Image (cartoon, helix red, strand yellow):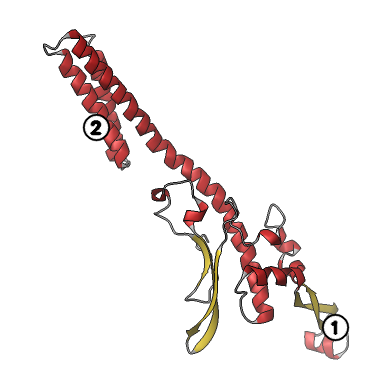
Amino acid sequence: MQRALFPISLILIALILLGYAFMYDQNMLFKLGGFMVLLAGIIVLLAQNTSLTKSSKIAITVFAALAAGLFSFLDYNSIQEPLAFEKVKKERFLKITQRLKDIREAQKAYKSVNRKYAVSFDSLNAFIAQGQVPVMKAVGNIPDGMTEQEAIDGGYYKKEVKMISAKSSIFNDKYMSTRDHSVSVDSLEYIPTTDQKKFRMTAGEVEKNNLKVKTLEVVAPNEEVFPEWSKNFYASFKDLKFGSTQDPGLNGNWE
């Protein structure tokens, strides 16, 4: 009975693994590992109850133990790798979405001045560094009991358009309060956490309701974001991006 303890333990472990695998829809590697551990336990149990030589039984037992150990390790990895990927994905996506938001803000300001989106990061960066944006400033106050127009007519209040630098307009105090670090304009085109891989940016124009509207799409391809990971880890979700080549909206697919 004592000799059967090891194979019976293997069989019980295998049944637990297989039950967990099918109950929680684990991947095929996990299920295969469970089957191999079960097979190893059955082989050892049968070997102990046959007329094989002692050396043959020892060889079979050692082989089965090694096989069980190997597939147990593969089972463990099949669980740990997805968990590790999810951690990496969360960290990288957090930085990439912030960079996409920065690009979106810069492109919105560029369009407000040029009536179109920048077609390249060179143009966008030059605008941020050297361009100016018109901003409406209120001068004076509206006295109690007066409407805005009455205050303007009476000379108490007026609105002036002033030009300020594009960078200070885009990345103003209110916007920067949503970030945990400053914006590096020179790095705007590069996908964070990558070896200077660039965002894919497409500016264009489509017709909607007989009107021509400007479009913009900026994408961080998954293969650039996760170059060291097998494609099966990220094949189930789309590349991070905002905008579209077919629609004027600038919504991000993470929002």
| Residue 95 showing in the rendered view | yes
Out of 225 and 236, give the one closest to the viewer.
Answer: 225
Measured in 3D between alpha carbons, the distance from the residue under mark 2 to the one under mark 1, in whole angstroms, is 82 Å
The amino acid type of the residue labelled 2 equals Phe
Which residue lies at the image location 53% right of the left edge and 86% below the top edge?
A: 212
In the rendered image, which quarter contains the N terminus? top left
Q: Which is in the foreground here, disc 2 or disc 1?
A: 2
Residue 179 image position (x, y, % from top left): 68, 55
Residue underneath mark 2 = 35
Out of 49 and 55, give the one closest to the viewer.
Answer: 55
Q: Is residue 235 above or below residue 244?
A: above
Callout 2: SS: helix
Which circle's residue, 2 or 1, is located before the other in the chain? Answer: 2
Which residue lies at the image location 30% right of the left edge and 31% below the top edge?
A: 17
Out of 227 and 40, give the one closest to the viewer.
Answer: 227
Residue 22 image position (x, y, % from top left): 27, 39
* Residue 157 numbered mark, or none: 1
Q: Is residue 49 above or below residue 86?
A: above
Which residue lies at the image location 69% right of the left edge and 52% below the top edge?
A: 180
Residue 42 image position (x, y, % from top left): 19, 23
Which residue lies at the image location 58% right of the left edge and 51% below the top edge?
A: 195
Count of marks, rendered view: 2
Residue 104 image position (x, y, % from top left): 61, 67
| Residue 141 showing in the rendered view | no
